[in-house]
Amino acid sequence: MSFSFDLLGQDGAARAGMLHTAHGDVPTPTFMAVGTAGTVKAMTADAVRATGAKIVLGNTYHLMLRPGAERVARLGGLHKMMDWPGPILTDSGGFQVMSLAKLRKMDETGVTFRSHIDGSAHHLTPERSMEIQYLLDATITMVLDECTKFPATHEEAAKSMRLSTRWAKRSRDAFVARDGYGQFGIVQGNVYKDLREESAAALRELNFEGYAIGGLAVGEGQEMMYAMLDITAPLLPTGKPRYLMGVGTPDDLLGSVARGVDMFDCVMPTRAGRTARGFTSHGVFNLRNARFIDDGTPLDENCGCLCCTRHTRAYLHHLFRAQEILGPMLLTMHNLTYYQRLMQDGRVAILAGNYDEYCQATRAGWEEAKH
Ligand code: PRF
Ligand code: ZN
């Protein structure tokens, strides 16, 4: 079973495909539930499966610090450890080091930092990141990169992108190819067209199994992000999957699929679920709001998840008010189911050639929450 991607249909720039991996197939566009520390927060693996998720994300940074990559390997790998036999993509660590670790120092060799958990010192190189992801048994390994902040000058962005390009080459050399496993390069270049072009061209030379678009959703706003996708997506091979890292809202997903993106990950549905925010076909609701105290209707009557078929808005409101752990569990379940359905229905629309209409109808539904 080799790692491959079939492009099955296109509607404008929007794509419907099928990703084949050693751990199963993934229909695209797809949303990857975030399982940072070897768990999708508040969810059993069975509950994650029930949302329709086909692939989950894990993090090199968190797992190398706790419980440790060698330990995960001794326990049989991340799939076995978290009871998720399906595909797992792991991020490479650099991005999380920059947002979470203390006393970070970046040089040509890699990044030195102190753990946010116990202050211990670590050095993460492209080679070590590849080794860790191998030990975790990641289906999809990400290259080590540096994500520039926004705003950044052209000079800063160029210097950083070229470092990421050299690390991508080292990551490719250190990657141990296995049947059905793949490695993705990450396009950087901030908001500069010439840098995105240089980055994409260099990464294409390395012939990755897929390509991620990094360095976006870092404060540049949706319009600028879309402009960068319009520039970057056409630079990537049509026969390989494209992954937009760390994005986004349901609206971001619709607009990014329209621009040629196949894969996403974001903490939004899980984090929002733990803080009482529910994504529905009528828009976003805060379940702590007093308007739901006597609301005996389902959270979203268009949703088949356990939360929506067995419980009411009033019950969710009560659970969050009483700080009961079932509140975050039910709402995470619902939000992930909502994101999965958004992508599944989008895929059907792309294959039917009416993706624009699908987006319009979906966005019209979200307006209802505002009234
Ligand atoms: N690089 C990596 N992980 C990421 C990003 C990136 O640029 C982003 C940017 N939105 C999220 N996660 N390796
Ligand atoms: Zn639901």
Image: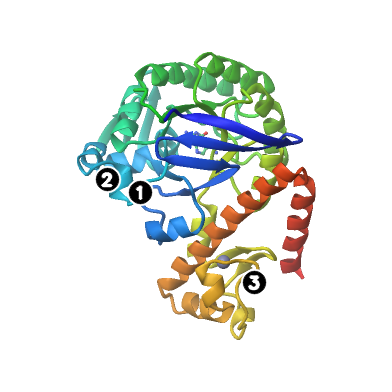
Q: Are the residues tagged 1 and 2 within 8 Å (C-beta)?
A: yes
Above-or-below relation of 315 to 52: below
- What is the spatial separation of the Cα atoms under label 1 and label 2, in whole angstroms? 8 Å
Image position, residue 39 (x, y; %): 37, 53
Q: Secondary structure at mark 2?
A: loop
**Which one is in front, 215 or 213?**
213
- Residue 224 in view: no
Amino acid type for the residue under numbered disc 2: Arg
Q: Which residue is mark 3?
A: 301
Crowding around mark 1 (Cα neighbors within 10 Å: few <14, some 14 to 19, many 20+) is: many
Q: Which mark is residue 105?
A: none
Q: Which residue is mark 2?
A: 66
Q: Is residue 95 left or right of residue 233?
A: left
- Identify the residue at image location x=39%, y=41%: 59
- Identify the residue at image location x=77%, y=42%: 353
Q: Secondary structure at mark 3?
A: loop
Q: Is residue 60 left or right of residue 264?
A: left
Tag nearer the camera, 3 or 1 = 3
Q: Earlier in the sequence, mark 3 or mark 2?
A: 2
Image position, residue 271 (x, y; %): 49, 57
Q: Secondary structure at mark 1?
A: loop
Q: Which residue is mark 1?
A: 37
**Which one is in front, 28 or 231?**
28
- What is the spatial separation of the Cα atoms under label 3 and label 1, in whole angstroms? 32 Å
- Identify the residue at image location x=46%, y=45%: 55
User: Quadrant location of residue 167?
Assistant: top left
Amino acid type for the residue under numbered disc 3: Glu
Image position, residue 49 (x, y; %): 45, 55
